[in-house]
Image: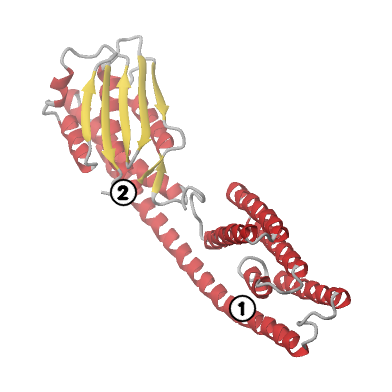
Amino acid sequence: MRLMFPSLQSHDHKMILLYRFHITLIVVNIIACGMDLLTQRYMNAVIELGALTALVCNLWFLARYRRLDLSAYLFFFITATALATLIYSNSFATMSVVFILLLPVTTLLFIRLRYSLLLTAMLFALMTVLLYMESLHNPSNPLIQNPQALFNLAYAAVIIYIFGLLYHFSIMKTFAELDASNRQKELLLKEVHHRVKNNLNVIASIIGLQANRSEGKGKEQLQLSKTRIESIAMVHEMLYQCDDFEYIDFSAYMRQLSGLLLGMFSNQKKIHVNIEAKEMRVPLEVMLQLGIIANELLTNSIKYAFEEQGGTVTLTLKRKENGYIFTCGDDGKGVEEPEALLRNNSLGVKLVHLCVKQLQGTLTLSKPKGLLYTIEFGDMKET
C-alpha cells in the first residue's frame, strides 16, 4: 500500500478505502465478464468490460494525482452508468438492481453530504425513468405488473440510504476524533524532536567552546566529539521539520552533514562530496546509525585522504531485497594495508564497528582507487 500511496496523511483513510472499492469492483467485473462470455451474453460482457477499463483508468488517476474528490465522482458515474445500462438491457432481470441500491451509500464516504443527496436523487430519478421506459416497451414485464414489488424495491432503497446516513454521521465523528488525536500526537512528536535537537546542540556548543580553549590533540578530539553529537541532532532536526516521523531523506541528510564536515575539516582543500541515492527515504533507526558511520568515514577522508589538490568522496545508498548497501569511497591516496584500518583501536573505528553491529550488517574495505567502505545490512524493521 505504501508504494501506491507514499507518505500517508490524516485524510488518506478515505483514499485507501476508495482504492479498495476500485479493486473490489474490478475483480467483480472480471468474474462477471468471464461468466457472461461463457453463457454467451455478449452485450453484458461488453458493458462489464467497458466498466472494467474505466475503473482501471480511474484507479491509475487516483494513484497518480491523488484527487480524491474527482476520483470519487468518476467512480460513481462509471458504476452508475454500467449498472443502469445492465439493468435496462436485461429488463430489470439482473442482480445489478441490488448493487444500484447500495451505490448511493458509497458516496457518503467520499463526498459532502449535500452532493451525495443530490447524486442519490438523480440516481433514483434515472431508475424511475428507466422503469417508465420499460413499462412502455415491455408492459408485460413481471416487475412492472407487480406494484408491490416496485414499492418494496423503493422502500428498501430508502431504508438502506437512511442506515447509510446514520453510519455516515457516526463514522465522520470517529474520523474527526482520530484526526484530532493524530494532530495532537504529531505536535507532541515534533516538540519532542525539537527539544532533543536543541539539547544536543547545546551540548555540542559547550564542547565547541571547550575546543576553542584547547590546543593540539585535545582540540581535535573535542571537535570530533562535537560533530558526532551534531550528526545525531541533524536526524531529530529533519524529523521536526517534516511530517513523516518514520523515514528521513538520505540525500538531504548527507548533504547537510557533508557541508558541516567540509566547513570544519577541509582546510580549504577542494573536496567535493558526491551523493548517489535517488529519492531514498530511510527508517529513523537506520539513519541514526548511518549518520554516525558517515560522520566518521567522511571526517577520515576529508582529513587524511587527499593532498592539497583535493578530490571527491562518494556516498551511495542502494536498496536491495530486504535491506540496503551503503558505500563511502574516495579517490585519494589510499593506504598500503586497508585491512589494518579496520583493526585500529581508535574511537572512530570502534564507533563504526558498533553501528554496523547495531544494523546487523557486514563491513568490508577495499582500495579500487583510494578507499571504499561497503556496508551491507538488512531492513531493521524486518529482522
Amino acid found under the numbered disc labelled 1: Gly
Residue at figure coordinates x 40%, y 60% from the top left: 188
Left or right: where does residue 202 sit relative to residue 91?
A: left
Disc 2 packing (10 Å; few <14; some 14–19; many ≥20) = few
Where does residue 235 sit, x and y in percent of width and height? 36, 43
Q: Is residue 62 visible?
A: yes
Local SS, label 1: helix
Amino acid found under the numbered disc labelled 2: Asn
Left or right: where does residue 165 sit relative to residue 208?
A: right
Residue at figure coordinates x 83%, y 74% from the top left: 134
Nearest the camera: 20 or 156? 156
Relative to 233, is 45 above or below? below
**Quarter where residue 115 is shown:** bottom right
Q: Which residue is mark 1?
A: 164
Give me the disc on residue 339: none
Nearest the camera: 298 or 237? 298
Local SS, label 2: helix
Relative to 181, is 42 above or below? above
**Quarter where residue 154 is shown:** bottom right
Left or right: where does residue 42 sit relative to residue 223?
A: right
Q: Which residue is mark 2?
A: 199
Q: Residue furthest right?
A: 136
Left or right: where does residue 142 sit relative to residue 99?
A: right
Quick one: label 2 or label 1, which is nearer the N terminus? 1
Q: Find the distance from the CA under tag 2 to the CA under tag 1.
A: 52 Å
**Quarter where residue 238 is shown:** top left
Disc 1 packing (10 Å; few <14; some 14–19; many ≥20) = some
Q: Residue furthest front?
A: 39
Where does residue 49 sit, x and y in percent of width and height? 67, 54
Where does residue 82 sit, x and y in percent of width and height? 71, 62
